[in-house]
Amino acid sequence: MSISSSQGRLQDRQPVSVIDIGSNSVRLVIYEGVARAPTVLFNEKMLAGLGRGIVTTGELDPDGVSRAIEEFRRFRALSEQAGAQSLHVVATAAAREAKNGPDFIRRAEEILGTQIKVLSGREEAYYSALGVIAAFHRPDGLVGDLGGGSLELVDVRGGSIGEGITLPLGGLRLRDMANDSLTAAADIARREIARAPWLAQGEGRPFYCIGGTWRNLARLHMCATHYPLEVMHHYEMDPVAAAPFVRRVARSEIERIRGVEGVSKSRRALLPYGAVVLLEIISAAKPSKVIFSANGVREGYLFSLLPEDERGTDPLISAAEELALLRSRSVRHAYELAEWCGEALAVLGITETEDEARYRRAACLLADIGWRAHPEYRGTQSLNIIAHGSFIGIDHPGRAFIALTSLFRHEGLFDDALSPEMRKLATPHYAERARLLGGLMRVVYLLSASMPGIIPRLKWESRSDGSLALLVPPDRAALVGERPQGRMAQLARLTGRNLVLDVAKD
């Protein structure tokens, strides 16, 4: 067997590296390629704290500069080791504002062997907005990117980017400006945020949070509320219900909050300042919900490298197609299943919202990714892969819906003990829709043997006795048997309809 190339990677992708030089952290991310739903090959960061003390000295922290410069040597070596065809480097607030910023950038460029793009505040807000546009399906709300040195706020509606502003409210900077006083920090944040009166346009719309400090705030909230899914992207907080928690963090009471040990000590120090800023934004914008994004400037920059015609494609469907290609028995079968299930729901009189249709299609594309597992664990393995996968363009109930569909398809339809936490996360509506979709799959997989060609030939027929028949073509009549008939009876019981499996007449 040849081991020259791994089949676990897409063969048409060329790795690309992006280094983000922030005011607090410096991070290298190597992506499998420039794609609508990029997959990370390698990810490493260090908390250099370049912006520490910049308020008083006007310069980058000397120790942070030394550590970052040394890390750049490793980052370049890692990028070359991974076979990256290109290395892109962006720098944000601290590097653009410090007196010794130009010298630091020059030294970094010599080591990295490439030009560094020092982003203006406007550019930083633009790429942050692109990161949200890339990661959410038709986002409509305000975006906030909280770094170590600055806060970028921008209005996003679908693919359009509206008003934006850069404020000096990054965690490190705010702490220095407030002289370690959280009361003073709240006053500063309130005063600065008042400079963006257009934030009132965010009332009743989501607020999308970007940045490590806010992601750690969300992680702490997950632990404190016993949230069942440890996935950061598209985690949502109700601004009213979560207000007491955020205020506790803003009072620096984090050591008494469950799960704080999961936040690094270097991050804990800035959590109260991130909470202070978030409280002031919620007060000014009155958003419907707070949504946390795993994507930010880096992913926004990568998105900008995509051809224009690829930017409008659905990232969830793109990722599902790729995983089907890598892990299913037949990609063509997955596409056939997606089309047939959509038709079947319509025949059964079931309408779908836009998101329900997207999620159903993704569920069909991912229905066979666990086939190499032991039969008794295919459902559980598939559920875990889907629930915890690095998907974008989908909320958490949608994840649960897709994961449960695969579980029901493998494990059966009527065991209420199956994954109760995931069913709760999915909501009753999605849980029942997943059961129905799983029921359809359980019938059709016994007719297709997981191979393409037969599914498009299966047709529904309404009969005079009120029954609804799924017809197998005459030349494949032998496919009808006891097991698929039993599965159809289960589906009939689930739907409350008179459903039969039969052979079409010549």
Image (spheres, rainbow, N blue to C red):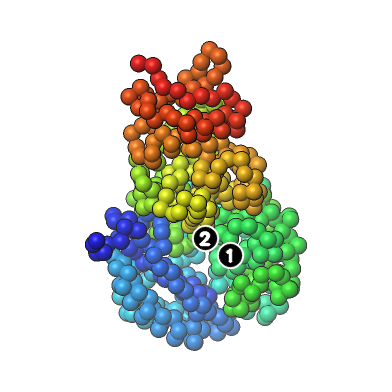
Observer-nearest of 486 and 294: 486
Q: Is residue 226 above or below residue 159?
A: below
| x and y, in percent, of residue 263 in the image | 61, 73
Most foreground residue, 480 or 160: 480
Element carrying mark 1: helix
Could one spot residue 505 in this view of the protein?
yes
Provide the residue designation for mark 1.
Answer: 215
Q: In the picture, which quadrant includes the N terminus?
A: bottom left
First along the sequence among labels 1 and 2? 1
Crowding near the residue tagged with mark 1, few <14, some 14–19, many ≥20 C-alpha atoms within 10 Å: many
Evaluate whether residue 174 shows in this view. no
Pick the quarter of the image with the C terminus: top left
Residue tagged 2: 294
- Which residue: 66% across, 70% down? 259
Q: CA distance from mark 1 to mark 2?
A: 8 Å
Q: Is residue 400 above or below residue 229?
A: above
Question: Which residue: 58% across, 61% down?
Answer: 230
The reply to whether dot 1 and dot 2 touch (C-beta < 8 Å) is yes
Label 2 crowd bin: few (<14), some (14–19), many (20+), radius 10 Å: many
Identify the residue at image location x=45%, y=84%: 67
In the rendered image, residue 324, in percent from the top left (x then y), is placed at 39, 48
Residue at the extreme front of the image, as rendered:
482
The kind of residue tagged 1 is Arg
